[in-house]
Amino acid sequence: MRVFVMIMLMFLTACQANTETTRTVELYNDSGDMVGTATLNEVDAGVNVKLKLEGLEPGYHGIHVHEYPKCKAPDFKSAGSHFNPTGKQHGPMHPDGSHLGDLPNLEADEGGLVDAELMLPEATLLDGKKSLLKGEGTSLVITEGKDDGISQPSGDSGKRTICGLIADKEKKTSETPTDPTDFNKEQEK
Ligand SMILES: [Zn+2]
């Protein structure tokens, strides 16, 4: 029986499009400098996000998963809205919240360093509508100010200052693409 279950599990795993359970996201500021990483890990309770960053303004910053894997500096508006596959409102303090991509605020210390571990309780890296790797993927964006946890649509957290791709293809859209055909397609959207 145990052998049968193991074979079934192997079979199911082989059938999934996304079998990845960990991914490192490189985060860049609006000048195109890499400021750190977010390591995503699939766990029973969701997706665990370990952040190691430098060069932030000391204090609290909003951090959210956004719907498009596009980090076009300097405003990162290309990332779209907060990732919201379940049709909720913004913020953990909202009665109809929160977006699946809403994370608790980050705190940078006096030296501008962040060493934090956060959770995305409903998310997954595997298949399904709650997958961060659904379609072309998503992105992780950090804002200048703190998320108040309730203001629509994004917690009044100020401008976007750091962005990283949670994408299947590591397309660095913040840099000049090498393939002009791809570039033209981007421009038409
Ligand atoms: Zn939100």
Image: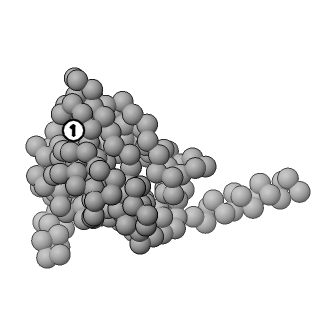
Residue 182 seen from this side: yes
Estimate how packed mark 1 is, as few (under 14), some (14 to 19) or many (20 or more) residues with alpha carbons within 10 Å. some
Q: Where is residue 101 in the image (x, y as percent from the top left)?
A: 39, 57
Question: Compared with residue 80, is residue 44 higher up or lower down, i.e. above or below?
Answer: above
- 124 left or right of 156 in image: right
Residue at 30% in and 43% down = 26
Question: Compared with residue 35, is residue 152 higher up or lower down, i.e. above or below?
Answer: below
Residue at 21% in and 45% down = 145
Question: Most extreme residue toward the right, as rendered?
Answer: 1
Q: Where is residue 83 in the image (x, y as percent from the top left)?
A: 36, 63
Residue 184 seen from this side: no
Between 121 and 39, the one lying in front of the other is 121
Between 134 and 170, the one lying in front of the other is 134
Q: In which quarter of the image is residue 39?
A: top left
Question: Most extreme residue toward the bottom, as rendered?
Answer: 188
Q: In which quarter of the image is residue 146?
A: top left
Secondary structure beneath label 1: strand
Question: Most extreme residue toward the top, as rendered?
Answer: 111
